[in-house]
Image (cartoon, grey):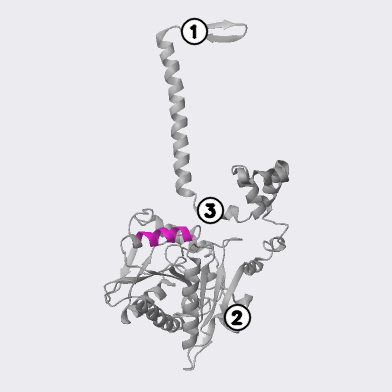
Amino acid sequence: MRNQYRGFTTVNLSRPGQRRVFVLLILGTALIFSIAGAFAMFQAKNSMQTSDLSKVTSHLSDKTLVMLIGGEVPYLQEHVQAYGIEKMVSRLIFEMATSIDFRDPRTFLGRELPLFALFDTEIDVASSDVDYTSIPIESPPPPELEKEILKGMQGSESSNDEESLPDAELRQGANTKHVLIYNTHFWESYLPELGETNPGKASDVDKNVTQISKYMAKQLEKMGVGAMTVQRKYTWNSSYAKSRKMVQSVMKQNDDLQYLIDIHRDSLPRNKTTIKGKDGKTYARLAFVVGGSSKNYEKNLKLARYLHNRVNQIFPGLSRAVVIKKRTNGNNGEYNQSLSPNSTLVEVGGVGNNFEEAYRSVDILAKVLTERVLDATPVMGQPQKP
């Protein structure tokens, strides 16, 4: 029953029916908020990757991070008190907004001069002609290719099924599969193969570095090393997180896999990525990238050094360098190399090379990797214990 009292409407809830409606209204509202909250948490859990968080924290200085953590860790609280909460908040907002650290002058120039970020990469070992202008560069595919990839993903029934096994190709020959070859940036291709001259167009959904992976797997099998390739289409955004799930799904079903090889194509021009052999033929030069933020960093670095040095023993200068990239200024810094202590990312040539030049180089790389695998694998096919 409604009553008017000094301009306000009052409702009499003394009747059972009215009380029931009021209670149901409150419960319904609470249920709606609960469902909305649960949905938001589910979305955050599935969309928020470690790599996404690292993109934020990588822009913060170590002092700022210590101050943030100090709010929860008693041992560090004295640092917060000494600095002052007002300064901490203003510093945090400034660094997140500008990605500038006053103690590192490079942060003033890195965003305006993209190639300046190359100096965040460390050259571990290199051929005599290699300097910072020869460091591997990643580049996203053109927007039109992204749209083509998305269209292909929408037409695939299993494209969003993370638990399904991706398209995996097991090579006939050796039964035990020790090597998995995949391509995080599967679209990377070579200009001569596409009839293009614009470096920004060196990408293709079908004619790309996945052919290099399949070729290398065949060569390994001929030499007695079990190998397999795997591929799935996905876009540039969070590509390493997506390829990680792809590799993990294959590893779950193949316990013998020890070596993970992620094949890429560099964005550098032909004069930086080509070398002529004694046979008069041209080869696509190699480069090995090690994730400095991986938990297996030391072991993966040891593997990359071995491959680089042995390749250059066979063909001096074929391997340009071993470079280390830590998680900073947009670098992934991990490159899925925490999945195995025998992981490496190898750049096979650049935009100006072609498949034949890449195949010639992969022949040598496969030979070197075969030596490594067979030396570490007993006759019975089981890996040696450390």
Camera-side mark, 3 or 1: 3
Q: Amino acid at mark 2?
A: Val
Q: Which residues are magenta?
A: 239-250
Residue 195 numbered tag: none
Depth order, front residue of 357/120: 120
> What distance separates the C-alpha of mark 3 from that of mark 1?
53 Å
The image shows residue 281 at horizontal and vertical percentages of 47, 90
Residue 264 appears in view = no
Label 2, secondary structure: give it: loop
Residue to which mark 3 is pinned: 52
The image shows residue 53 at horizontal and vertical percentages of 54, 52
Camera-side mark, 2 or 1: 2
The image shows residue 61 at horizontal and vertical percentages of 66, 55
Label 3, secondary structure: give it: helix
* Residue in the image at 30% along x and 61% along y: 253
Tell me whether the residue at label 2 lies in contact with that at label 1, contact meaning CB atoms closer than 8 angstroms: no
Residue to which mark 2 is pinned: 130
Q: Taking 62 as reference, is 227 above or below it?
A: below
Secondary structure character of the magenta stretch overall:
helix
> What distance separates the C-alpha of mark 2 from that of mark 3?
32 Å
> What distance separates the C-alpha of mark 2 from that of mark 1?
85 Å
* Residue in the image at 41% along x and 14% along y: 20
In which image quadrant can residue 135 be found?
bottom right
Q: Earlier in the sequence, mark 3 or mark 1?
A: 1
Residue to which mark 1 is pinned: 12
Q: Taking 203 as reference, is 41 above or below it?
A: above
* Residue in the image at 53% along x and 85% along y: 317
The image shows residue 57 at horizontal and vertical percentages of 59, 53
Depth order, front residue of 253/63: 63
Near mark 2 (Cα within 10 A), the count class, few <14, some 14-19 or many ≥20, is: some
